[in-house]
Image (cartoon, helix red, strand yellow):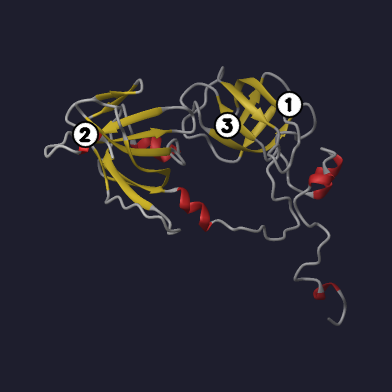
Amino acid sequence: MPAWLDPALISMALCWRLDRRDGVALGFTTHDQDLSIGGLSYRAAPGMLPSAISVSDGFDVDTLDVSGALTDDAISATDLAEGRWDGARLRIFGTSWERPGADMLPLARGELGDVGVRGASFTAEMRGPTAMLERPVVDQTSPECRAELGDRRCRVNMAGRRRHLTIVEIIDETTLRLDEGEASANAYAYGRLRWGDGGNCGLTSAILSSEGATVVLRDAAPRAAVAGTRVELSEGCDKSFDTCRSRFANAANFRGEPHLPGNDLLTRYPGA
């Protein structure tokens, strides 16, 4: 128990730190003045309040709601709509506002889940580490691969399959022409385009198809793209066994069951 909780009159301030997946970190506090902890400024405005925090030693899923005000320089409605805060890591702790950062009392940690916006405020659900217990323990069978290209189950070496290129022309809202062509036909189909600068910096868009130096995105970017924007392109995979074997020579690591009979087995034969 921190020493600053012993006196009859305590100087406790709640603080929470938000770390987005693109590296942006923000800190907030319930104190009426900004606090500096570990080189990060925990701002007193906009105010944010967590719901009741309960800690148990069981396996129940820990969740709580965090609500706050929307501001242009902290958490904006645009950033929430673009998904910049999806999956952000959240850590809530208590500290003494007289000695910020000394003998911190951890209260909760997890990731942001569902986010709702109403007027000039927002409410976000925090899902604790025990939320992982809700995930399936064993994979279900499927004819397609359940791994992602380049992950620890797929094991395809992504060196040379990610390239940093520049957009030279905006053909339409989903079609872009780059300064260099692809290494093989339709190499970036089902891949990812990560925006390196501009209004979409830090966001990722799914690629529908590619041909030469042209790529077609599945959906339009949240903000209009402009020529000269730097992007990172990662090759994709359609998760079929034939592609895994012929294109990546990775059949040994295929995480699917392409030859397992399905529910339609009986309908393949006459008189079934």
* Residue identifier under label 2: 4
Q: Which residue is mark 1?
A: 159
Residue at the spot x=84%, y=45% of the render? 251
Outermost residue, bottom direction?
271
Other residues around mark 3 within 10 Å, as few (<14) / some (14–19) / many (≥20): few
User: Badges 3 and 2: C-beta atoms under 8 Å apart?
Assistant: no
Q: Is residue 163 left or right of residue 203?
A: right
Q: Secondary structure at mark 2?
A: helix
- How much space separates mark 2 and mark 1, taking CA atoms? 51 Å
Circles 1 and 3 in contact, beta carbons < 8 Å = no
Give how far across and how far down residue 258 sits, in percent.
Answer: 80, 57
SS category of the residue bearing label 3: loop
- Other residues around mark 2 within 10 Å, as few (<14) / some (14–19) / many (≥20): some
Q: Residues within 10 Å of mark 1 (few under 14, many from 20)?
A: few
Q: Of label 3 and label 2, which has the lower sequence position?
A: 2
Task: Please state, as top left, top right, bottom left or bottom right, where the C terminus lies in the image.
Answer: bottom right
Q: Residue at x 43, y 59 (%)?
A: 60
From the top left corner, tell me how far across and down residue 131 is, in percent.
Answer: 47, 53
At label 3, which amino acid type do we have? Answer: Asp
Query: Label 1 vs label 3: CA separation?
Result: 30 Å
Residue 243 visible somewhere in the drawing: no
Tell me which label, 2 or 1, sits earlier in the chain: 2
Q: Amino acid at mark 1?
A: Ala
Query: Which quadrant holds residue 184?
Result: top right
- Residue 69 location, quadrant: top left
For label 1, the SS is: loop
Q: Residue at x 68, y 60 (%)?
A: 140
User: Which residue ends up furthest to the left in the rendered image?
Assistant: 9
Residue 204 seen in the figure: yes
Say which of 151 and 102 sits in front.
Answer: 102
Q: Which residue is mark 3?
A: 172
Q: With 228 as the anchor, is 66 left or right in this view?
A: left
